Image (cartoon, grey):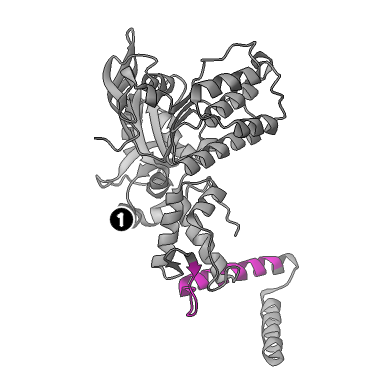
């Protein structure tokens, strides 16, 4: 699991960890039931105090995204829609923004993007 | 008595007329890396030398592992890894000599660790200390300190003169060491960008006084920069909001504040669209604290708040 900490942003480190793990869950990079690195492992990987990792994991746990199993470690929660609606919407918006920026670089109009989008959706549905 | 690894009470030191350290009270828990920050001449070196018992305080006292600095128990001395800013080994001694000396002093010396660190910088143990560059000297001395497996590390500008990648290596080694051994470290430096990555707390000294001692994570959560137009009318800041500093240029006012999240939300409501509130790097925070000395700062702040 690769995390990047940005010290210039002034954002609390535990929050950065929480946000990035949420993102990885939402994007599917981290799968349900998958185990997260141990507190010690992650602390050493990121060169931070283990207590900061504990704080991040606790936040994820109270948000229902991970579960802690006694003596085994911390795991991505299984089943249910683990991704909160807010996070999902935020991610979708980011993806849309990126796609539109890319499209405008290619010289495509908004209408063209919408058409292509609809067509791709139709294709995917009929393919199923 | 105390559960703190290091604590000081009203620690004060004068050099003649000049007060180098002014009434410093500090308590440091086990397992922390404390960045001791401040401009040159702020009192960082004096503070570390007082802790080590190398100089006597004018007033107050300090303890390491409950043992007083003035008369430190032998058993505690052997648990401290001190790297002074100026106290240098003899020029003619080779790296191997220094290693043997350190091994004799520290009882439990990690030779493999030290040899790895020498090889990392592609140095030979036959080299004399005097032939090393400023950065290489620092690297070797830091390696000797860490290999001695101390419980407490007091490092005065350990990364000065090292190139950026070596600085990162040194601080990474220190962080790993503290995490693995549950050691405690104070690192004095005036360069924030390197140390903020691995440190847990910041102690900022200016003109001999401890002006901030806080967890870096708390500072990241609490310190914000407010930007608004010079034209904006002044608002009354709630008392819970600590104003750290401010400046005014080009029709824009910048104000640095510290407050809890609740108060920040109030502030956001109060300011509404009139201002932008954003997070700041530790560097910005530090500059806001130390750029102006206290009197000048108060005067300027009044001006800005008007």
Within 10 Å of disc 1 (Cα), the crowding (few <14, some 14-19, many 20+) is few
**First to last magenta residue range:** A75-102
Residue B170 placement (x, y as % from top left) = 58, 34
Q: Going 24% across and 35% down the picture, which residue do you hit?
A: B1
- Tell me the chief SS of the magenta region: helix
Name the outermost residue toward the top. B16
Q: Note whether B261 is above or below B213 in the view shown.
A: below
- The answer to whether residue A6 is left or right of residue B116 is left
Residue B244 placement (x, y as % from top left) = 36, 37
Residue nearest the viewer, comparing B180 with B259: B180
Q: Going 61% across and 69% down the picture, which residue do you hit?
A: A95
Figure quadrant of residue B242: top left
Name the outermost residue toward the right. A106
Find out whether residue A87 is within the magenta segment: yes
Residue nearest the viewer, comparing B117 with B167: B117
Q: Note whether B44 is above or below B226 in the view shown.
A: above
Q: Quadrant of the C terminus of chain B?
A: top left
The number of callouts visible is 1
Residue B268 placement (x, y as % from top left) = 35, 55
Residue nearest the viewer, comparing A8 with B2: B2
Find out whether residue B47 is within the magenta segment: no
Q: Chain of mark 1?
A: B
Observer able to see residue A12:
no
Observer able to see residue A15:
yes
Residue B142 placement (x, y as % from top left) = 56, 27
The residue wearing badge 1 is: B262
- The answer to whether residue A5 is left or right of residue B269 is right
Figure quadrant of residue B297: top left
């Amino acid at each position: 699991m690769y995390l990047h900490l940005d010290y210039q942003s002034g954002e609390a480190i535990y929050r950065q960890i929480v946000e990035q793990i949420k993102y990885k869950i939402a994007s599917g990079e981290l799968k349900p039931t998958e185990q997260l690195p141990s507190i010690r492992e992650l602390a050493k990987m990121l060169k931070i105090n283990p207590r900061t990792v504990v704080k991040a994991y606790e936040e994820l746990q109270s948000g229902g995204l991970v579960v802690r199993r006694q003596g085994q470690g911390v795991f991505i929660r299984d089943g249910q829609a683990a991704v909160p609606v807010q996070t999902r919407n935020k991610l979708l918006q980011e993806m849309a923004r990126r796609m539109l920026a890319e499209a405008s670089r290619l010289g495509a109009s908004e209408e063209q993007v919408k058409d292509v989008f609809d067509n791709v959706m139709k294709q995917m549905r009929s393919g199923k | 008595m105390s559960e703190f690894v290091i604590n000081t009470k009203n620690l004060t030191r004068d050099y003649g007329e000049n007060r180098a350290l002014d009434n410093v009270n500090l308590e440091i828990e086990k397992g922390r890396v404390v960045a001791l920050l401040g401009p040159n001449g702020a009192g960082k070196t004096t503070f570390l030398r007082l802790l080590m018992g190398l100089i006597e305080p004018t007033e107050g006292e300090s303890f390491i592992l409950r043992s007083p600095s003035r008369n430190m128990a032998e058993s505690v001395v052997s648990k401290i890894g001190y790297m002074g800013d100026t106290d240098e080994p003899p020029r003619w001694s080779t790296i191997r000599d220094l290693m043997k000396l350190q091994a004799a002093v520290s009882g439990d010396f990690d030779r493999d660790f030290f040899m790895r660190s020498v090889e990392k910088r592609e140095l030979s143990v036959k080299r004399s200390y005097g032939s090393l560059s400023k950065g290489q000297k620092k690297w070797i001395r830091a390696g000797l300190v860490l290999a001695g497996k101390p419980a407490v590390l007091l490092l005065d500008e350990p990364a000065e003169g090292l190139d950026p990648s070596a600085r990162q290596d040194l601080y990474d080694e220190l962080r790993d060491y503290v995490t693995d051994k549950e050691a405690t470290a104070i690192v004095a430096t005036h360069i924030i960008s390197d140390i903020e990555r691995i440190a847990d707390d910041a102690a900022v000294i200016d003109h001999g006084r401890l002006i901030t001692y806080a967890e870096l994570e708390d500072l990241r959560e609490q310190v914000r920069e407010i930007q608004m137009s010079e034209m904006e009318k002044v608002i009354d800041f709630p008392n819970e909001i600590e104003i750290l500093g401010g400046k005014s240029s080009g029709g824009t006012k910048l104000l640095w504040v510290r407050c809890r999240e609740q108060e920040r939300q109030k502030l956001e409501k109060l300011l509404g669209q009139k201002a932008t509130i954003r997070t700041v790097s530790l560097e910005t925070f530090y500059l806001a604290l130390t750029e102006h000395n206290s009197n000048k700062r108060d005067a300027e702040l009044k001006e800005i708040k008007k």
